[in-house]
Amino acid sequence: MLLPRISLTRLIARLLLVPFAALFSYPSPGFATGFGPSLGAASGFAALAGAAVTCTTSTLAGNVGYGTAFTSTGCAIAGTASTPPAAAYADFLAAYDMLHFNTPCDQTLTGTLAGVTLAPGVYCFPAAATLTGTLTLNGPANGVWIFKVGTGGTGALTGTSFSVVMTGGAETAACPNVYWWVAQAATLTGSNFVGAILAGAGITVTGGTFTGEALAGGAGTSLAPTGAVTVTNSTITACPPPGGSTMFLKAKCNQGVGNGPEGCDPGNSNNHNGSNDERGGAPGNPGRQVGNR
């Protein structure tokens, strides 16, 4: 089994806090069906940051975890605001790395995603993503959508008047099974956003609504994330732990370019690292069951 491309310092640090199986989760096609990425103890956090969380005239329906300071001005907090236990940080950082290194792309996306409809799958932007308009996610209640921004090494997520709409049964799920991995910062303005953001740097939300978790600073090299979360005139509603999700994988194909679903198995494409089975790993041992958010 090949190791993820994580720095030795970070790998040693993570081994002190994170269960071994959580770090090396290479789901085979057979076992990936039924699992999505796990947030573990980071579930239920409307905002989680290694640095400060700043909330102004907003509602945070979920816990708030901060490393340096929490500033609230005219905010309603439906949860606990505190410096979180090490497990919350560790599970966030492990999930960030898993999405980064061990979740191959179904398809490369371009453009603003306005008017685009996507089935469950793993979708990637090689660099920054500047999004606007309405994105429709069409699939069953237990489908999973994973978006990766900055797979080429750098890239921020910017959403302006950007809405995510769930259809086809996905709208009936108690918690949306949507995840946004971002290499750098994430900024949402006047958007109605859906999905957990796992950002490499800070997260800024101004206006609109956000259903999911805002988890900032996953690209840091320390045991704690380094980013900050700033929320102004917004409502963030975290998914209650556990969530639960199912990854629907598809047939073998080449990685394409465009905005439509390609219909391929991300563990069996010819333009990324292979799955656990393809690498000769032992099937039946996917590590931590990552269906529980």
Image: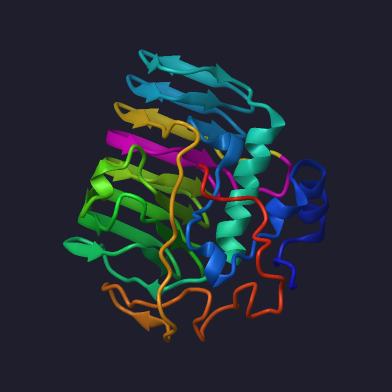
Q: Is residue 210 magenta?
A: yes
Q: Looking at the image, is 100 positioned above or below residue 266?
A: above
- Kindly indicate the quadrant of the structure image that contains residue 87: top right
x, y (%) of residue 190?
24, 39
- Looking at the image, which residue is at 36% across and 39% down? 175
Q: Nearer the viewer, residue 123 or 49?
A: 123
The way the protein has been coloured in the rendering is: rainbow
x, y (%) of residue 238?
41, 32
x, y (%) of residue 30?
54, 69
Work out whether residue 49 can be spotted. Answer: yes
Q: Is residue 73 left or right of residue 41?
A: left
- Looking at the image, which residue is at 29% across and 55% down? 140
x, y (%) of residue 153?
56, 67
Q: Nearer the viewer, residue 174 or 66?
A: 174
- Count of numbered badges drawn on the protein: 0
Q: Looking at the image, is 113 positioned above or below residue 176?
A: below
Q: Nearer the viewer, residue 124 or 238?
A: 238
Q: Is residue 198 magenta?
A: no
Q: Which residues are magenta?
A: 200-223
Work out whether residue 153 can be spotted. Answer: no
Q: Is residue 3 left or right of residue 46?
A: right
